[in-house]
Image (cartoon, rainbow, N blue to C red):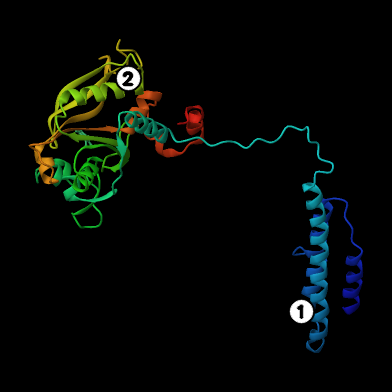
Amino acid sequence: MLDKINQLVEEIKGLAAQSAEEAEQLRIKYLSKKGLVSQLFDEFKTIPNEQKREVGKVLNVLKTQALDKINELKDGFAASANSEVGTDLTLPGTSSELGSRHPLSIVKNEIVEIFARLGFNVAEGPEIEDDYHVFTALNFPPEHPARDMQDTFFIATNPDVLLRTHTSSVQVRVMEKTQPPIRAIFPGRVFRNEAISARAHCIFHQVEGLYIDENVSFADLKQTLLYFAKEMFGPETKIRLRPSYFPFTEPSAEMDISCSLCGGKGCNVCKYTGWVEILGCGMVDPEVLKASNIDSEKYTGFAFGMGIERITMLKYQIKDIRLFFENDKRFLDQFKSAQI
Ligand code: DAH
């Protein structure tokens, strides 16, 4: 066996390769599981115990030599591949593919930018909330259906730890910490225990807006939202406010925009009405100001809340909300030119 080993040692010393592939072939020949060196290791198991010490030593030296030699050959080719000698510098380069921003991020950034032009700051709040900030401080009566197990995800069995069902909770967090004037928007993720369909999801995104100061009126709300609608959906866009109800605003309204697809003539997106609803809004209820220690005699304010998925679906004519969460590259690639 010693002879065989010595013969291989000599053989390996003289190895040469013309290319990286040849070097790899040599590695396979000598060092792979069934290679010549490995075969010797198998044979080693069968020799008498008293020879093992001596033969083992030489065998290990052989293995290290083989490894070093083959690595040396391989490194030589790697180095010459990297060097510029022999490289055709006029060849076109391989361009690396750029990723794209997620459509929801694009639209969120656009909303933030539009309101920034009107002096709105951005603030964020926690996704895991308590009952007080999501409901109680926003004037939800104790038996309000939105608090129901059917709508709200509770964490474990504690009814006071829950996933926020709307970003209105951030209003409360900001009002607790800041005295007016407050002019801010709060983008974020919200959670509702809803069956998933083309139009609804249990996780989605909202942007909440809040403006509190002396003498803030409903006219200010309307002008702000009209500006937003025109910036987001184009200068021809009209708005319409319909009376509605939310526990935290009085009066409350829902805002429709003229259908950006058919320009108000009627199509299947606006269900042939010419209008599509995009947000809820209203004047902050004095009870909500009081709950956060803001003087409701001195200050008034407005608030609004919109779903980012809904705005994105209207803007880009996306028919199924589930597409936002599937990470299908064919869908995401379509937003490459819309970076903001
Ligand atoms: N929080 C409401 C929702 O989740 C949206 C909303 C409506 C927010 C009216 C407001 C508002 O600030 O004034 O549907």
| Residue 223 appears anywhere in the view | yes
Viewer-nearest of discs 1 and 2: 2
The residue singled out by tag 2 in the image is 230
Q: Mark number for residue 192?
A: none
Question: At 88% from the left edge and 79% from the top edge, which residue is drawn?
Answer: 2
Q: Mark 1 or mark 2, which has the lower sequence index?
A: 1
Neighbor class of circle 2 (other Cα within 10 Å; few <14, some 14-19, many 20+) is some
**Measured from the top left, where is residue 119 in percent x and y?**
30, 32
Residue type at mark 2 is Lys
Question: At 85% from the left edge and 50% from the top edge, which residue is drawn?
Answer: 19
**Measured from the top left, where is residue 96 in percent x and y?**
62, 37
**Measured from the top left, where is residue 64 in percent x and y?**
79, 71
Q: Report the image quarter containing ligand 1.
A: top left
Task: Please tell me how many numbered marks the rendered image carries.
Answer: 2
Please, which residue is most extreme toward the bottom here?
A: 50
The residue singled out by tag 1 in the image is 45
Look at the numbered disc 2 and give the secondary structure of its residue: helix
Q: Nearer the viewer, residue 6 or 205?
A: 205
Q: Nearer the viewer, residue 261 or 151?
A: 261
**Measured from the top left, where is residue 310 in percent x and y?**
32, 29
Q: Are marks 1 and 2 in contact (CB under 8 Å)?
A: no
Occupied quadrant, residue 238: top left
Quadrant of image for the N terminus: bottom right
Q: Nearer the viewer, residue 113 or 59?
A: 113
Quadrant of image for the C terminus: top left
Say whether residue 17 is left or right of residue 91.
right
Residue type at mark 1 is Lys
Q: Nearer the viewer, residue 69 or 56?
A: 69
The answer to whether residue 278 is above or below residue 25 is: above
